Image: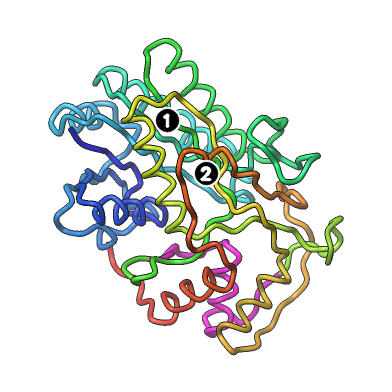
Amino acid sequence: MSVLITGGAGYIGGHTVLALLDRGEIPIVLDNLSTGYRSAVPSAVPFFVGDVGDLNLVEHIIKTHKVEAILHFAAKIVVPESVADPLGYYLNNTVKTRALLEASVRGEVKHFVFSSTAAVYGNPAVIPVSEDSSLAPLSPYGMSKLMSEQMLRDTSQAHGLNYIILRYFNVAGADPKQRWGQTTKQATHLVKVALETALGRRPYMSVFGDDYPTRDGTCVRDYIHVSDLADAHVVALDHLRLGGGSRTLNCGYGRGYSVKEVIDAVAMVSGVGFEVRQASRRAGDPASIVANCGELMKLGWKPVLNDLQTIVRHAYLWERTLRRPDN
């Protein structure tokens, strides 16, 4: 029996492939290479170029490789882009997830781990935010993920598909062994944008809003190292394999950093000053969001890279030598 990873040639999916390989499992990867890279996936891993919405292809993979579990990463993830293109996000993140779930039911897949987002919480009234907090997405991105969460719950109720929903907070960093890192073109993630600016690949970077009700006026986020997040998927998979019940879990560290604090950390790690310009707020951005991740830790997850300087340093080492591969 095997594990199918959708979006396994991308940033988080690629790190999760490495986490599984590190413990002796060889997953199967499905990726349409719209944002991922074939070179992210080691040659020993079976690889299919295709779309998660292709029901026939997914059914073929499930049947041929006797897939017992699916880790579903494939998605569009840029909040401002979702505001401009809501239909594209509902198609890619919600409609295609529905097709993947149908293929899972037809193929009698037992376990499903879904990549969701803290964006489902919107602007939470209480920080840190727990899994039972009110859900009020501020963007089509957050809503597309919330709709997919509900489809997964309903599918589980009707067909017995066990699941874990992992709600990511802000993901950053790179594999400590430098086997993979964030390689996204025109990235919008703060740490990567700041590093690209420090390394001269952008003339300046923008801070979107300095009048939020936070300690320095800029948005506050909970940054989680991508390798710790990959390990969270392995823990979730083990939980389901051992007969554990379906759960919805936050993935963060429980500590928030402001945009200005992250920029200062990048300047310190890189040793470079760079131009930062002030810009207006972006649609869909909450002021502050920090995770209560106690429930995930009860499953046995033990973060080991939960330090902003470590996150930035690993990302810097990757970015400094990055030559974006071809697909």
Q: Nearer the viewer, residue 263 or 78?
A: 263
Name the residue carrying label 2: 297
Query: Could you say whether the residue bearing mark 1 is in a helix, strand or loop?
Result: helix
* Residue 303 coordinates in the image, percent (x, y): 49, 55
- The colouring scheme, among rainbow, by chain, secondary structure or one colour, is rainbow
Name the residue carrying label 1: 97
Return the residue found at the far top. 158
Say how many tags the image has: 2
* Residue 97 coordinates in the image, percent (x, y): 42, 30
Rendered view: 174 above or below 198: above
Q: Which callout, 2 or 1, points at the residue further toward the start of the chain? A: 1
Rendered view: 30 above or below 15: above
Q: Distance between the residues labelled 2 and 1?
A: 27 Å
Image quadrant containing the N terminus: top left
Rendered view: 67 above or below 138: above
Q: Does the magenta stretch include residue 193?
A: yes
Q: Which mark is residue 212?
A: none
* Residue 21 coordinates in the image, percent (x, y): 24, 53
Q: Is residue 21 magenta?
A: no
Q: What residue type is labelled 1?
A: Thr
> In the rendered structure, which segment of residues is drawn in magenta?
181-206
Q: Residues within 10 Å of mark 1 (few under 14, many from 20)?
A: many
Q: How crowded is mark 2: few (under 14 residues within 10 Å), some or many (20 or more)?
A: some
Q: Nearer the viewer, residue 253 or 138?
A: 253
Task: Identify the residue at horizontal 72%, vertical 30% (top origin).
Answer: 134
- Quadrant in the picture for residue 87: top right
Task: Identify the residue at horizontal 54%, vertical 85% (top origin).
Answer: 200
Task: Identify the residue at horizontal 40%, vertical 51% (top origin).
Answer: 231
Q: What residue type is labelled 2?
A: Met
- Quadrant in the picture for residue 322: bottom left
